Image (tube, coloured by chain):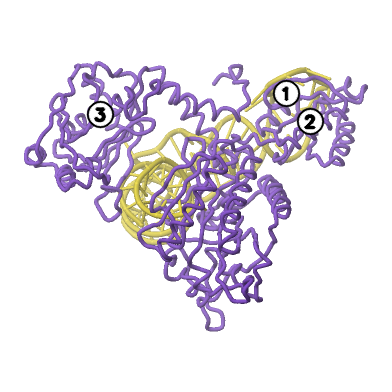
Chain colours: A purple, B yellow
Amino acid sequence: MALNSRPKWDERFLLLSLVSLEEKMADENVPYEESHLYRIRHSASHIMAQAVLEKFPEGKVAIGPAIDDGFYYDFDLPRPLTMEDLESIEKRMRAIIQSKVEFVRKDVSAEEAKEIFKDQPFKLELIAGLEEGNLDEDGNPTDEKPQISIYSQDKFVDLCRGPHVENSSQINPQAVKLLSVAGAYWRGDEKRPMLQRIYGTAWNKPDELKEYLWRLEEAKKRDHRKLGQELDLFSTVDEIGAGLILWHPKGGKIRKIIENFWSEEHEANGYEFVYTPHIGKSKLWETSGHLGFYKENMYSPVDIDGQQYFLKPMNCPFHIHIYKNTIRSYREFPIRYAEEGTVYRYERSGVLHGLMRVRGFTQDDAHHFCRPDQMPSEIDFVLDFSLHILRSFGFSDIQAYLSTMPEKSVGEPERWHAAEAALEESLKRAKVTYKLDPGGGAFYGPKIDLKVSDAIGREWQLTTIQFDFNLPDRFDLTYIGEDGQPHRPYMIHRALLGSLERFFGVLIEYYAGAFPVWLSPVQAALIPIADRHVDFAREAAAKLRQEKLRVMVDDRSERMNAKIRDAQKQKIPYMLVIGDKEIENNQVALRLRNGENLGPIPISAFIDRAKEDISKKI
RNA sequence: GCCGACGUAGCUCAAGCGGCAGAGCAACCGCCUUGUAAGUGGUAGGUUACGGGUUCGAUUCCCGUCGUCGGCUCCA
């Protein structure tokens, strides 16, 4: 991008404008699945399959749906595809589109379908599922017994429910592009064959494709891994190990601010802070059930005096032992223990991802203990509190999920359903939109998850609020009730920010590194124009530091333009330019990182402005 | 873990079909003393991720390991 075409908008709004782009593209008042764009993409995937089969006649086709921003199709091919293959496939697709092929639907019987697809084992498997009436043509569970239909265009025929465009002339060949090849398991099952998936995208018009590709480029710029390097926030290093994060001073500063805010808010809301060790004996993890249910995610034990100790993958057993340390009365409830607990979990090498998915991370964990009758209000409280904290960081677009009883679970179904209802009630009361995730709960209880999206629209779970029917039993937790008898308390696990690592990653992407002032590691760069202005800049910096502002003086023997450029690249919120005029009037010339030049103002006026921005968390 | 791609200076990237490894930025030493996004000259910087193998010779070819990236599966 040319230097003087630099966008002037505040980058933090970029994400929002990108989201609205997607809405703009959608047909008015029509669900995506019924939109014209969806047909274009789905049809493009069939055309791609045709082009691939022409190139590899012995290839086997699996499924090829339209997805959010495009489409994909899975194939079993004799050799791995290269980027050159993609180019030639794309070229062939354009030719097919331009030959104006018709898409023809035909309902067929299972027998006819089996004959048509006799050389396509994946299709035969799908047909068998359709025949059984429990799976649709994408292999997803369904209630009704669907009509088997096929779509054909040119020489290609596919098992498909549709809908498609009527004719490929409705697809603009210049608005279609293949993006990447990746491995994907047949039916998403890692025990089944690995297929090759080609991802592509298609739009109504070439301009929309161009805009989408631009958007992908922009998304790359706000990738937290790239910004982590550029802004000197964190790193990982081969010598230490994969998925283990080094927080650099600037990232550490931000973490510290987050932690301080977190502590104040928790203290003000009835939480008590606890600290617990990083390892515990194998017996502890047997009692908790982790060695039974979670062993794959735990690291090998260390031997201490002939006893096995495990690194903790969770903090709960430790908090529970604090609870158990004395006899509890119903009068004490609710008890809320909070800890920034660092846990270690084995994650398979292929899933590691920057700060978002790591092997050692710090959860902002808490465990609530209460009487059964307090449960609804306790859920209300923790949900409200969570939303309050997330919104304090500027996250407005929060998606909630309610996960219910999985197949493998402990506890009576009645308790599950009561707990699920309590969670749902809280969601309704808090007026958050939520989706159901049936069967998505932990084995020990239902949960609410709160997620926010990263730069390229991937959702990341931050908050999780989980009921636990398991641990109070396993550890035999009790309290003495009004009746003088022991009772079993209810227990909630919750991680609010989730993990500090992931939260930081999401925060970086959300703001594209241009953090709100209160979070910025350096809030102001003082920029003396010439060396003779450095002393004044240092004095001004001292004043600002006394006001608890984080500032740096750029006293390099560089031109002002270079200093501004560097401060700008570091996304420092305020640049204070100091020259002869400013010194004469005891002022600083304020420039904002959005490029706005506000001119000279008294230092005291800058302090007021900065403090106001900080208190407003903008 | 699986499929594919990749690993060259602090960063971003060249080159090398097996024969002395190169640029910009950053760093360091100077000069310039600057008015809202890169002033200028010089210096230094590398066991080409690591370990083996083939070879007169490997950074290049082969094997393995580690790591990174895009997905899949799995999760904060």
Looking at the rendered image, the disc whose residue lies closer to the viewer, 3 or 1, is 3
Chain ID, mark 2: A
Q: Looking at the picture, which amino acid does disc 1 mark?
A: Asn
Alpha-carbon neighbours of circle 1 within 10 Å: few (<14), some, or many (≥20)?
few
Distance (Cα) linking label 3 and label 2: 56 Å
Quarter of the rendering occupied by the N terminus of chain A: top right
Which of the two discs, 3 and 1, labels the residue nearer the N terminus? 3
Q: Name the residue under label 2.
A: A557
Q: Looking at the picture, which amino acid does disc 3 mark?
A: Ile
Chain ID, mark 1: A
In the drawing, does residue A463 fall left or right of residue A56? Answer: right
Which of the two discs, 3 and 2, labels the residue nearer the N terminus? 3
Q: Mark 1 points at which residue?
A: A561
In the drawing, does residue A609 fall left or right of residue A15? Answer: right
Looking at the rendered image, the disc whose residue lies closer to the viewer, 1 or 2, is 1
Q: Residue at x 45, y 71 (%)?
A: A291
Q: Name the residue under label 3.
A: A89
User: Residue A91 at x, y = what percent?
Assistant: 26, 23
Residue A541 in view here? yes
| Corner quadrant of residue A206 | top left
User: Residue A324 at x, y = what percent?
Assistant: 62, 74
* Element on which disc 2 rests: loop
Decide which of A522, B45 is in the foreground and name it: A522
* Element on which disc 3 rests: helix
Q: Is residue B42 above or below residue A322?
A: above
